[in-house]
Amino acid sequence: MKSSTETTRPPRMNHPPFLAKASWRVLSLCMNLLHFQKPSRYINHEFNALHKKAPVSVALAFPDIYDVGMSHLGLKILYKIINDLPFAVAERVFSPWPDLEAALREQGELLSSLESRTPLRMFDAVGFSLQYELSYPSVLNMLALGGIPLRTNERLEREGMPLIVAGGPCTVNPLPMAPFIDAFLIGDGEDAVPEVLSVLHRWKEDGSKDRIALLKALSGIEGLHVPFLGKDSVTRRRFIESLDSAPFPEGPVVPFTGIVHDRVNIEISRGCTMGCRFCQAGMIYRPVRERSPETVMKIAEKSLRSTGYDTVSFTSLSSGDYGCLNYLMGEFNRKFSDRRISLSLPSLRVGSVNEGMLRELRAVRKSGFTIAPEAGTDRLRAVINKGFTAEMYSHALETLFRAGWQNLKLYFMIGLPTETDEDISAISEMVLLAIRTSKKLTGRNVALSVGVSPFVPKTHTPFQWYGQNNIETIMEKNRQVKASLLRRGVQFRGHDPEMSVLEAAISRGDESLSFLIETAWKLGCRLDAWKEYFDPAKWYQAMEVTGISASSFAEREYAPDARLPWEHIDTGISREFLWKEYQNALSATFTHDCRTGCHACGLTCRPRGPQNTAAIPRTAAGPSAEGAIPAEGMSIKVRLRYAKTQTVRYLSHLETTTALIRAMRRASFPFKFTEGFHPGPKVSFGPALGVGTAGLKEYLDIELIPPFDLQAGLASLQENLPGGLRATELKAIGKGEKSLTAFVVRYTYEISGERDLSLDAWLGNKDRMVERKHGSYRVSDMVEDVQNTGNATFVLTVKDLGEIKVRLDELLPLVFGRPADALGITRQSMYGWDGRWQEPLEDAIAWAARS
């Protein structure tokens, strides 16, 4: 990605019109969310969401969409830490999807928080998590949408502007975002964030309006870098000594919509000592610190009870190297497998795969498996310090396939230092070995996908001196690997080379990159991590406007004695150690795990965590948890009536199902589970509600293991439902009773709209024939009755016609002349025929919730 080399300030462009008007309006609660993709991202009131008032307000801003941000463990940790402070409140805000952004701009409304709908500009502080370089334009976009000037010097000129803080791994080179961020938190935030907010609290209480004084006070906190005050002094990374004593969210917010990591995530360790030379996180999160198995188990118990999830992931940079992983997994399965709670692990090193681990992973349900070999030859693996041989890889594959795995993901990099054509060819050979091994041991091909990403040199790693391959070379290597893998029928997932060039440029860039980032944003760049929105043409245009070449930064090689732009940030790892490791890389010299011997990286480590606790065995004692799941005998069938109103009417049927099942798990319902590889609760729902439709009498059937107290169960369920869902009745029914979908064929709806809503269309469409793929029907046959109850509100009674089911999106325009998404729709009741029309629980003796 090349351009001219002259650096200029980006052209001044007009802010969106609604910002120029200084509108104080917020995202309207009555905005029709049906107009937006996945409206459940925006409805708030998820279970465990906190709503409080406090003197200091913080918006935790994640520069990607809800689905990604709600998967981020760091956000959950900070949400707990801040809301536990008596003087502070934290609320969440995420980058809007383009459809919502367009609506905000069109309607002149400001980006606001989920919990209280407060515009960003009205918070005392806005904290961004910088996880990925290409999210930087989204940071600027969120500031602008929130009514906040982009640059620190602009905010200093105006009263009432929030403090803008950023944390996350990208802050170890704060320079490209320095003009936009008031303070960077370098390192762990558990201790530092309360200190930052205490300073802000005192500043507010004093009634001071001297923002420069506030910045100076913040600069005195260890780990805080304040760009406005210059970079003459060195900022040392902040890190916590012990994970066992660190706060951790045991009751995280439970999203309505499916998110990227939709499970309980427990950080079992932080840091890594394997010393992979390309891995920035492995360097900047040293030293390794482990949570004890006892603490992990306590967190798991409380988190499962408070969330209703059915999967727990033990996360870390290298979970397979946790000092007593098999023991922990065995203890977990002995406690939770009878509830069908399953375990998962992130991608693993080849050398960490073992039979005991696989036995525990498959105890409840078997998910896919991910291994990251990274490089194709022993020589290149020595260069990057990836410590395994071809023999170890072959053994890992055999162990995995013998254990019955049928899904495997492999991750590799191209463009690594000293890489040759032989190294590139060896990637496909490693993949071919996986194919052959799976056929040999399972008699079939596994579902195999291969991810290939261009190498991105990162700051504070041994490869910070090394320049990235030029984009033409990267593309050619990518083409070679892709062609070789596709010939073998493997699913290929490649990372966009143009993205990688920008990642490298921004990662190793200086303050001038801020002009490129700002100009790219003004040209329309945002959500660049999403392939459908990444537009390299806009970045090329930004380079032409600013005269900044991304390639010149990405490909730049630094001399051994060169002053590196980011050296005012001290991660604790010495420059001398990193240079020595760079030289070891060039000579393909392997450096062993530093837990087996100190390599003088610059940190003064001491033993931390259970990896040094001899009393804890590395493997689980006793029988495998696979055999611990009891065979279930008799069960009872229970029918629940519930209401779905308020903003949860925007949930899809799947989202509603998930929310109710999780609530029942929180309420300790003793589920009867399905058989097979993916056991789940035996639950069957009635006819689905459309997105945006409320329901007053909805039903589901559940199979439970007796004994079960209906009254206590109903009360407990009601306490564990999120706002907008309400359990109203619960009873036991006979197992031979018709299923809800077989019984219900008739429905009553309340339809409301604008004042001029009428039945004019109905009069003209009564006798109209509607064609479906598998039949046709007359409108008047499906519409049994429609009554005008006044105030532009009607009661509509409709029925299914055999296999032709009611579809409101098709029917309502014929009755009211309006599309369904322009009407307020509430399903009041549903009926089946049993000698007369009756509701599913009409004649039952049941426990009914008292209003």
Image (cartoon, rainbow, N blue to C red):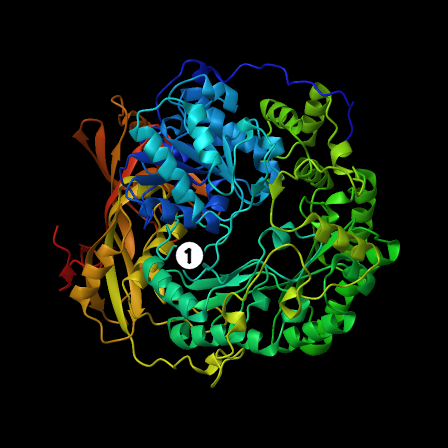
Q: Answer with the quarter of the image where residue 547 lies.
A: top right
Q: Is residue 701 left or right of 563 when viewed as pictured?
A: left
Q: Is residue 732 left or right of 621 when viewed as pictured?
A: left
Q: How many marks?
A: 1
Whether residue 768 is visible: no
Label 1 crowd bin: few (<14), some (14–19), many (20+), radius 10 Å: few
Q: Which residue is mark 1?
A: 246
Above or below for 191 versus 712: above
Judge by depth and name the residue closer to the eye, 64 or 165.
Answer: 165
Judge by depth and name the residue closer to the eye, 707 or 13.
Answer: 13
Locate the N terminus by quadrant: top right
Judge by depth and name the residue closer to the eye, 843 or 442.
Answer: 442
Looking at the picture, how far across and down is residue 488, in whole percent?
77, 60
Q: Amino acid at mark 1?
A: Ala
Q: Residue at x 57, y 15 (%)?
A: 13
Whether residue 574 is visible: yes
Q: Residue furthest bottom?
A: 622
Q: Is residue 795 left or right of 773 when viewed as pictured?
A: left
Q: Answer with the quarter of the image where residue 632 lies.
A: bottom left
Above or below for 623 versus 256: below
Q: Residue at x 64, y 28 (%)?
A: 511
Looking at the picture, how far across and down is residue 160, in whole percent?
37, 22
Looking at the picture, how far across and down is residue 430, in whole percent?
77, 64
Above or below for 358 versus 169: below
Looking at the picture, how far across and down is residue 112, in whole percent?
39, 31
